[in-house]
Image (cartoon, helix red, strand yellow):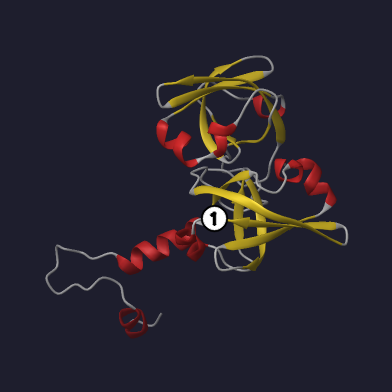
Amino acid sequence: MFTGLVEEMGEVLSVENGEKSIKLKIKCKKVLEGAKLGDSIATNGTCLTATELGSNYFIADCMYETVKRTNLKRLKAGDKVNLEKSITLSTPLGGHLVTGDVDCEGRIVSITPEGIAKIYEIEMERKYMKYVVEKGRVTLDGASLTVMRLGENSFGVSLIPHTQEMITLGRKKVGDYINIETDLIGKYIERLMKFQDDTKDDSRGITMEFLLKNGF
């Protein structure tokens, strides 16, 4: 579990392509403090297991599901990536609860200056738009950000100058791809509302009628 508060930007040292997999070597410093072999490190918002730790790098393997869903497959040596160590029960929750399980890639369709800020419009698969709400939170390349507006199949976020310098989104341009993780709570609510318990003949699952009848 993560908070979506990026600790540092690391640098890709190498990308080794395997059979439906990739191995990444990432140069970093802060996320290595207190890190142990097997720890989870969010890399562009993707939860990866550190399989090797050096004095200024870690190595992680990416399986096919990760390669297929995320922009890690687009990385090359020299690219910057957002990094965050997994949280503990004593970690301040400054962002929101982030799993590191990316839903899909999004594409930047516009970048518009507005005062001191820049507004980034992100287009993504429509089926995931139901989990994005105005003034809710969304994770972009591992950074917890507030949704400022919604479109039919896109949403906008606004970055102040400090944030632009601290995360990779501030370096991206129109047409670039970014990892998106939508809010976890919405997914569970949808699952509970739609689930049908086949063990009970008279069960219709949780419906609006059921919730109203039981005081919700």
Determine if residue 41 is in view. Answer: no
* Image position, residue 50 (x, y; %): 53, 24
Say which of 14 and 209 sits in front: 14
Is 187 situated above or below 193?
above
* Image position, residue 49 (x, y; %): 50, 28
Amino acid type, residue under disc 1 in the picture: Met
Disc 1 on helix, strand or loop?
loop
Please indicate whether residue 113 sits to the left or right of residue 143 in the image. Answer: right
> Quick one: which residue is furthest to the right in this view?
115
Which residue is the site of mark 1? 124
Is 139 situated above or below 65?
below
In the figure, residue 203 lies in which quadrant?
bottom left
Is 12 situated above or below 156?
above
* Image position, residue 191 (x, y; %): 35, 62
* Crowd class of label 1 (few under 14; some 14 to 19; many from 20; radius 10 Å): many
Say which of 26 and 108 sits in front: 108
Q: In the rendered view of the protein, which quadrant contains the C terminus?
A: bottom left
Which residue is found at the position 32% from the left and 83% from the top? 209
Please indicate whether residue 206 sits to the left or right of residue 164 in the image. Answer: left
* Image position, residue 71 (x, y; %): 56, 38
Determine if residue 191 is in view. Answer: yes
Which residue is found at the position 71% from the left and 56% from the top? 110
Is 146 situated above or below 71?
below
> Quick one: which residue is furthest to the left in this view?
201
Say which of 151 and 92 sits in front: 151
